[in-house]
Amino acid sequence: MGADEFPHMRFHPDHTLADAQAELTRALAEARMETPQRDARFLLQGLLGIDGAQLMSGSARILGAAAPLIEDAARRRIAHEPVSRILGRREFYGREFIVTPDVLDPRPDTEAVVELALDLLKQRGLLGRELSIADIGTGSGILIVTLLAELPNARGIATDISPAALAVASRNAEAHGLADRVRFVATSSLDGCPGPFDLVVSNPPYISTGEIATLERDVKDYDPLLALDGGQDGLGIYRKIARNSLDLQRPFLTVLEVGATQADAVEGIFSAVGGQPVGRRRDLGGHPRAVALEIHL
Ligand SMILES: C[S@@+](CC[C@H](N)C(=O)[O-])C[C@H]1O[C@@H](n2cnc3c(N)ncnc32)[C@H](O)[C@@H]1O
């Protein structure tokens, strides 16, 4: 959208919350954003610190000093900045996480990794045990923080090659009162982290380099390239994690997020190091999004 086509918007301090919601929804729709109503609702709730019920019941509330904040947020969203990046936070598995330009905007699909890991631990009667967990490519820390919060007797390490991402993950661990149960390590995959681990999880970068230019603007203009680029075929990081698995004490369970068409290929890569597929979980779109492997001797 060029400057001339930028939708005209008016958010005046005397306007009500209902006026602002209608105006924001209209402007986002005019700018052809995919989910204008939803975005308007989440932006207003986040900016004003209210929930959905308060948004409805407070429709007569006067905007006052919030008016320019709403206008700024509308302009950023129309430039395709994700809602969570505008608000600086995102909900994942029922908990709130800080997000910054240094980390991938956490996706709801990644909850499949948590669900599959917890299901398999439950099946094996391991939920209450003193588990050791590793999260590779932790980004904002959603996976390690969620798993440690769900498994009160677990401890973990979380790695990333981005020190800036590790700083965000560390803030999230602190915010959830888990800092004493996790160590953040700046390294590639699990290099220099001997374990032993009972569970290894990862949502690594898995988009092939050639595909990056074709991604939606919300993704390619805002998520860090380090969080997206999985090399020539998108599978390079899985091969590296599989190589690392050879150095770890076994058996252990690994649960990995994969791209929509990658499940078979990733299971194949891990079979070569003694991995046996033990489960898959589909995402909301019906694609296999998480695969689990038990790595044996
Ligand atoms: C797709 S993001 C996932 C972030 C987070 N786990 C999530 O699910 O939202 C991948 C993360 O892996 C990191 N990364 C990329 N290559 C890596 C490597 N070789 N070793 C460790 N981390 C890596 C990136 O910096 C990024 O934070």
Image: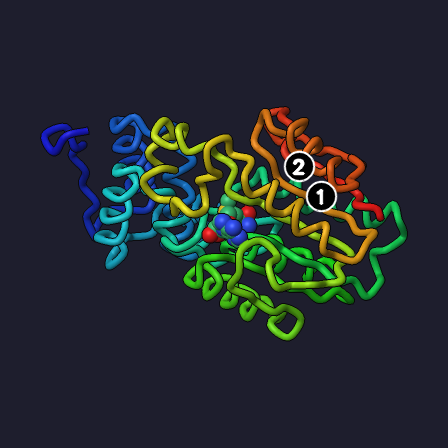
The residue at 62%/39% (across/down) is: 257
Residue 277 vertical position relative to residue 130 in the rendered view, above or below: above
Q: Position of residue 282 (x, y in %)?
A: 67, 30
Choose mark 2 or mark 1, whichever is in front.
2
The image shows residue 22 at horizontal and vertical percentages of 31, 35
User: 9 or 255: which is nearer to us?
Assistant: 255
Residue 51 visible? The answer is no
State the residue at coordinates (27%, 42%): 74
Amino acid type of the residue tagged 1 in the rendering? Glu
Residue 176 lies left or right of residue 49; in this view the side is: right
Cα distance in 3D space between marks 2 and 1: 9 Å
Mark 2: amino acid: Ala
Please tell me which residue is depicted at 34% across the width and 50% down the height of the picture: 86
Q: Is residue 275 visible?
A: yes
Residue 252: x %, y % from top left: 79, 51
Determine the image quadrant of residue 24: top left
Task: Read off the residue under disc 2.
Answer: 290
**Dot 1 corresponds to which residue?**
115
Quarter of the image where one finds residue 23: top left
Q: Position of residue 180 (x, y in %)?
A: 64, 75
Are discs 2 and 1 less than 8 Å apart at CB? yes
Q: Is residue 30 left or right of residue 289?
A: left
